[in-house]
Amino acid sequence: MTASRATASRATLAGGVPGLQLSLRGKQLEVTGSDPDLVIEARCEVAGESDGTVLVPTRLVTDIVRSFDSGAVSIVGGEDEVRFSAGRAEFVVRVAAGAEITRLGAPEAGGIDLPSEVFAEGLRQVVRAALADDSRAPQLTAVQMKATEKGLRLVATDSYRLAFREFEGLSALEEDSQVLVPAKALAEVQRLATAGREDGGDKIAFRHSDLDAVFELGEVRITTRLVRGQFPDVDRLVPPSYSYQLKVKREDFAAALRRVRLLVRDSKDITTPVRLSFKEGGVELQVLTPESGRAVEAIEGDFSGEELMIAFNPTYLLDGVEALKSDVLVIEVNDPGKPALVRGEEEDEYRYLLMPVKVS
């Protein structure tokens, strides 16, 4: 169930079990899942007989419905229990009387339609760079949506890498304004838009207030609390030019990186870097671990500048490479101790900045 992906780890039902709300109005069933910062509502047409609302345990009910064979599912709710049946299988699930789910103040007016395919591709490229754990810097768990002179920009960073995506000509916000949207919510927007839902259409309706933002994709509405805080000034981090430039086939580089990264998987130190040695004729990738040994692979390419070696977290580097669509990967460097730029040769709208790792 789409809505179940929003349910929180904190309790909404007795016994510490996250809850999923089922609401029937006429012939429309609305399923709502939520945590304190995210609400997902999914609607569908059903053969409804009697209106009502009930809160059920998320994981149990989701597993029950998924276990049924394809076909109609009957749901009958009461004050203390809900009966789920399909074919010869029947489950009676206890419910908690008086329990409620989180509701956010969803803005109803205004907004704009975003192109579904293009926006989802931008989210795929950018969301991966956001910070996963909010204990260090909560504002970095968000993606900055910012109005620029050219249109709309998405930016995410975890302080080790930085992803930019420009949407030229797309005006989703007021001039010079910005909002910080949780990466968790945008990952759900991307997942739904990419899944190609039959009822999703080719547009994503977007609107926001000072506190919340709403994304609507067909019969699914995602409401999220906006993140408060000061987002880094990222424009100053990208230099106007670079001294060293490598051009290589993206798929060849990605495949080699995946291979040499296999040693990191079995290493006690998961931060073991991949060393890139740039030289005339291409680049050599090397991973060296005391436990597993050494992996080396050379890739042909075009390199301009003096020979140098720079090291990166291999997972972070692969994230940037896989985000690209261009056949030709470009890596630009000014100094082995300063951030490198990863981009596609014909992909000016997307840039990925990555901090190097110090090696002896």
Image: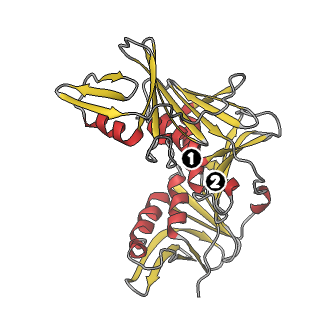
What residue sits right under mark 2 in the picture? 141
Q: CA distance from mark 2 to mark 1?
A: 8 Å
* Image quarter of residue 137: bottom right
Q: Is residue 239 above or below residue 114?
A: below
Q: Is residue 279 above or below residue 154?
A: below
Q: Secondary structure at mark 1?
A: helix
What residue sits right under mark 1 in the picture? 184
Residue 299 is at least partly visible in this image: yes
Q: Quadrant of the N terminus?
A: top left
Q: Residues within 10 Å of mark 1 (few under 14, many from 20)?
A: some
* Image quarter of residue 59: top left
- 284 vs 232, left or right, is left
Locate residue 333, reporting x and y percent: 67, 70
Q: Residue at x 48, y 35 (%)?
A: 192
Mark 2: amino acid: Thr
Mark 1: amino acid: Lys
Q: Residue furthest left?
A: 88
- 73 vs 6, left or right, is left
Q: Residue at x 46, y 62 (%)?
A: 254
CB under 8 Å between discs 2 and 1: yes
Locate residue 332, reporting x and y percent: 65, 66
Q: Residue at x 64, y 69 (%)?
A: 355
- Colour treatment of the image: secondary structure
Number of marks in picture: 2
Q: Quadrant of the C terminus?
A: bottom right
- 315 vs 334, left or right, is left
Locate residue 140, reporting x and y percent: 67, 56
Q: Residues within 10 Å of mark 2 (few under 14, many from 20)?
A: many
Q: Secondary structure at mark 2?
A: helix
